[in-house]
Image (spheres, rainbow, N blue to C red):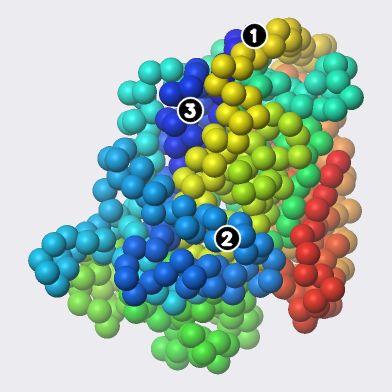
Amino acid sequence: MKKYDFLVIGSGISGLSFAIRAAKYGTVAVVTKREAAMTNTSWAQGGIACVQSEEDSFDQHVADTLDAGAGLCPEPVVRKIVSDGPAAIQELVDWGVEFDLKKAADGDLEPALGREGGHTQRRVLHHKDTTGREIEDKLLEEARETEGIDLLEHHFAIDLITTTKLGLDSESRCVGIYALNEATGDVLTLRSDRVLLCTGGAGRVYLYTTNPMVASGDGVAMAWRAGCEVANMEFVQFHPTCLYHHELKSFLITEAMRGEGAELIDKDGRHFMKEYDPRGSLAPRDIVARAIDREIKKTGGPCVFLDITHKPAEFIKDRFPNIYETCLSVDIDITKQPIPVVPAAHYQCGGVKTDVNGMTSLEGLWAVGEVACTGLHGANRLASNSLLEGVVVSKLALANCLETFPASHSSEAIDLPEWESGDVSDVDELVVIYHNWDEIRRLMWDYVSIVRTSKRLQRAATRLQNLRNEVQEFYWNFKITSELLELRNLVDVASLVVESATGRKESRGLHYTLDYPEKDDAWQHDTVLKK
């Protein structure tokens, strides 16, 4: 057993910014299941939304967020995160993050702000079209140089350890985790009274997604198994514009491109978005994704197109160099050709239920970022609010950690039992794991994606229950591997999404069902589940 003052699971913007700040108060372990840089943060293209100009205001940013959230965003939470944004952005800059600048009228440099769907002002700070990678690289560099931080790469968090599981307290609290060292196959016991979940989302629960392979819902699944409340899992955001190409199936075409004037068109060049919303291609993501889904089904075509060819070629190459080079690698010159695009699973608006400080319903456990549900995103996330939430709420979570367990607090002497594998054998049928993984993702895409029905949801629930039984049998009878752990988490999270969607008898934000196509004020509340 190894003890730490702070235990962070995940190495994206939330986990690393928390760890860097927390190292001033004690020892920190950052546990991450792959290389530290392999996070959803690294894949974020568009930017980070924050009020930065005189034309903008906190009130306008709050209003845009509330509008996108379709009635489920608590305004105090939104206002706190938005108003704390500028100070958090300054911290990122102090840690070396470089945002694009431009010359102001007086000759001084100022942020080059972008605009995305749902925003009424330009307020998106960016680093070309690789903002997330810039943030991840600079935070990782800072974390590696900060004394007191242990970065445990290729360590897969298996489960949270609670006092209830240990038979110690009637009031459960989190006291550590078990983590698989993928290099050795050993399971480590890590002890701390301050555990922070920053594991990102669950995009890989769907067949088509913009997310990296690590996004398998690990944090939500662990927290739910430990007895935490989970909220609003039915609200899964489908990004409207994922590149449609057989070689590059998960490549995102950032919304910032539409913010710079790109238009959605069909194969005949028709601009169809005004038929669905007066804001056209700059409507919020839920509206745009459903419109594209409708156009594809109506025309029978495999995709629609995003056209930015009317902009100067040099502007396109300078503003979107990563997208330009990536598309060119598959013979699509975006300065001359429209980009074939389809919607794909992108972001979960629900997660482990927390307050604005990241505090969960389980004492000793905090959750920040996409794994958590503060309420900021409501029923539909406003573009580029996610990185903002991660860097702001991680700061609030640290303050709350130190209030709950002051800096002088030392984890009490609880001897956590070592992991016991029992009478298990090596997995000799990986094909079964891969088949189940594939089946989960296909059934979620077919039955629980952009447009849903009660009948499809029931079919998904029935099959998922059978799959959960199969996965549990595997888990208890075979030696654990990262593939088995991810499958276990995927089936749990998929089941939570289906249960939440089945319970909401209306259409709101990202949850659209043909059986209840209208919004119903009686359902203007969170969907909360607890094991």
Image location of residue 291, percent across then percent down: 59, 80
How far is the residue under mark 2 from the one under mark 1?
Answer: 40 Å
Residue 36, picture quadrant: top left
Which amino acid type is shown beneath numbered disc 3?
Ala
Image quarter of the N terminus: top right
Where is 81 relative to 189, above or below?
below
In the picture of the structure, the residue carrying the numbered disc 3 is: 22
In the picture of the structure, the residue carrying the numbered disc 2 is: 78
Report helix, strand or loop for mark 2: helix
Q: Is residue 45 visible?
A: no
Which marked residue is nearer to the observer: mark 1 or mark 3? 3
Q: Nearer the viewer, residue 284 or 7?
A: 7
Where is 60 relative to 406, above or below?
below
In the picture of the structure, the residue carrying the numbered disc 1 is: 1
Give the side of residue 330 with respect to residue 451, left or right.
Answer: left
Q: Residue at x 77, y 70 (%)?
A: 524
Report helix, strand or loop for mark 3: helix
